[in-house]
Image (tube, rainbow, N blue to C red):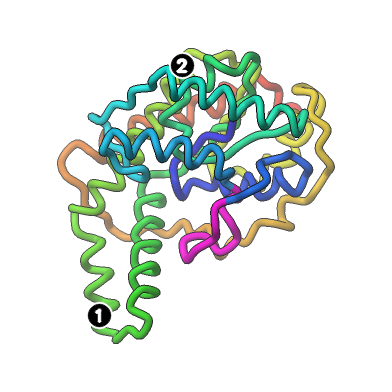
Amino acid sequence: MILGMHRSGTSLLANWLSNCGLDLGEQFISTDVGNTEGYFEDDLFVEFHRKIIQNLGLSSDYLLSNESIKITETDKQTAIQILKQRNSKSNQWAWKDPRTCLFINLWDQLISDLKVIAVFRHFDEVVYSLIRRKVKAEKKRRNVILGSLNVLTKKKYFNKKYTDLFIKSWIRHNQEILNYLNHCSEKNVIVLNSKDLEQKSKSVHLYLNEKEGFDLKSLPFESVFQKSLMKDETPDLIYSNGLREKAETIFEELTKKALLFERATSIERL
């Protein structure tokens, strides 16, 4: 199970793992202006998650901290069928969908000895990436854009209406990850800052093969990593009172977890 908020490097990680031979599904959702290299998200899981969230009248992309998800018995049986379908086709498989962060407990209950890679990225970088994606999508919809309209579009998405929405969603997704990490078995989890994906890729590959029993071929991370697509610049972003502080606390806790799990899984020594 690959965990991570939207725009946090999970597609990059999934791309690399897929090329190493990890089965991530037969039918991926389509690429778009937000991710030209592909999302590597299995339709089975994405549609399952989206349907539950939308049936509750919630946003399937930006779930907020005060919105809860209720799993019915029908949902649970559907999830079991998805797992049976994937297990019947491959003995080493995974899935990636940012919405998985909102369903961690369900999948943890259904999958024994679950293996997890959790990726996190600083909230300012994620929020700015979401702003850029919104601007690109609006530009494509308009087809022909005047320079002044581009300026107005960018100004619109820098408004607190959007920055608050994005950071609240970051908080929700990453708090769910943190809650899981506080209670799961350390031996089955890898936690990575998105900035460390390239540097730690060899250790992750070795750990998955030698400690977790996977059979993945060796592939240089650089073969799928385009640094130009993972921008780390962050202009001044304005949030409502308390949101930055809350996100900063979660980010610091995740950073500590990355170090703890790194030591626990011996990635540091590998």
Residue 199 placement: quadrant: top right
User: Which mark is drawn over residue 204?
Assistant: none
Task: Name the spot of residue 221 as percent of width and height, x first.
Answer: 72, 50
The residue at the point 65 percent across, 34 percent down is 94
| Label 1 – label 2 distance at C-alpha | 46 Å
Q: Quadrant of residue 226?
A: bottom right
Q: Amino acid at mark 1?
A: Leu
- Does residue 77 appear to the left or right of 63 in the view shown? right
Range shown magenta: 29-40
**How many other residues sit within 10 Å of disc 1, few (<14), some (14-19) or many (≥20)?**
few
Residue farthest left in this picture: 241
Res 182 label: 2
Residue 241: give x, y in percent of width and height. 15, 40
Quarter containing the C terminus: top right
Determine the residue positioned at 25% across, 52% down. 163
Q: Is residue 13 above or below residue 162?
A: above
Say which residue label 1 marks. 149
Looking at the image, is mark 1 or mark 2 earlier in the sequence? 1
Observer-nearest of 244 and 127: 127
Amino acid at the residue labelled 2: Asn
Relative to 268, residue 58 above or below:
below
Q: Magenta includes 254?
A: no
Q: Height in image: 4 above or below 183? A: below
Q: Are marks 1 and 2 in contact (CB under 8 Å)?
A: no
